[in-house]
Image: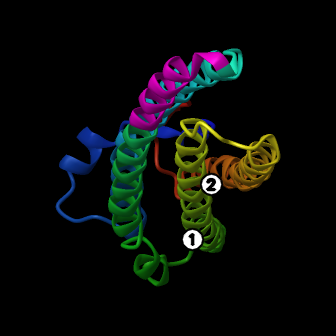
Amino acid sequence: MIRKSAMVLFLGMVAFLASCSGQSAQEEMYDHLEKTVTLEDAFKEQQQQLSALEEEEQQLYSEIINSSKDELNTIQELSEEAIGIVEERKEKLKLESESIQSAKEEFNKVAPLIEDIEENEEARNAAEELVTVMDKRYSNYEELHAAYKEALTMDEELYTMLKEENLQESELRSQVSDINEKYGRVMEINETFNEQTERFNELKKEFYEASDLNVDYNES
């Protein structure tokens, strides 16, 4: 899967919050937002590993299609190896999804706090839009995950076909075409996901500034 944009991680506030006997709604939201970002670290890690596996699989695919029909044993061995990589990608996708689900559960603690924001319409508006964008982002991820999972199944079907001695060229072309179409859809959804991530980062910064939370932040 194409790498997703990483959310901005805001730092600071620790000493300040520790010195307070009680937290404002904005401060509580800060805690949940930053924990959400931290929980998505595993998501980013799986993305990096997925990208490496995709490159490895692509190399195998290139070797397969550059082999002649007389090298069936070699093609079968390479296809079996590629199927193994597809299985690894499935496992990484599962771990990625678990990371997103954990982050989503943490983020869901933010919305109920918005009504407790008092006398700061700018902060409230930023928080409301932030939640709307992030909810759409997580919903979009579910669509992205489903499309990528379907693409993996199609990849596995392709390599199984390539192991067959009497594979028809028309069947191969049809499968490759379907796979390309599916990954095209994955890229479209991924682009939207990245845009939503960037917008979330902007809104989080706006919310912190409107709430007068004195934090430093970095983009990764």
Count of numbered tags: 2
Taking 64 as reference, is 79 left or right?
left
Residue at screen point 54% across, 43% down: 7
Q: In this view of the protein, which residue sits in the foreground, 106 or 80?
A: 80
The quarter holding residue 102 reads bottom left
Taking 87 as reference, is 206 left or right?
right
Please identify, in this view, whether the residue under mark 1 or under mark 2 is nearer the observer. 1
Q: Amino acid at mark 1?
A: Asp
The spot of residue 197 in percent (x, y) is 63, 50
| Residue at which label 1 appears | 135
The spot of residue 21 in percent (x, y) is 17, 61
Badge 2 element: helix
Q: Quadrant of the N terminus?
A: top right
Q: Which residues are magenta?
A: 70-85
Q: Residues within 10 Å of mark 1 (few under 14, many from 20)?
A: some
- Real-space Cα distance between discs 1 and 2? 10 Å
Q: Is residue 83 magenta?
A: yes
Badge 1 element: helix
Q: In this view of the protein, which residue sits in the foreground, 82 or 143?
A: 82
Q: In this view of the protein, which residue sits in the foreground, 190 or 133?
A: 190
Q: Is residue 2 magenta?
A: no
Q: Amino acid at mark 2?
A: Phe
Residue at screen point 47% across, 49% down: 213
Mark number for residue 219? none
Residue at screen point 41% across, 77% down: 113
| Residue at which label 2 appears | 200
Q: In this view of the protein, which residue sits in the foreground, 211 or 64?
A: 64
Residue at screen point 66% across, 15% down: 67
The quarter holding residue 58 reads top right
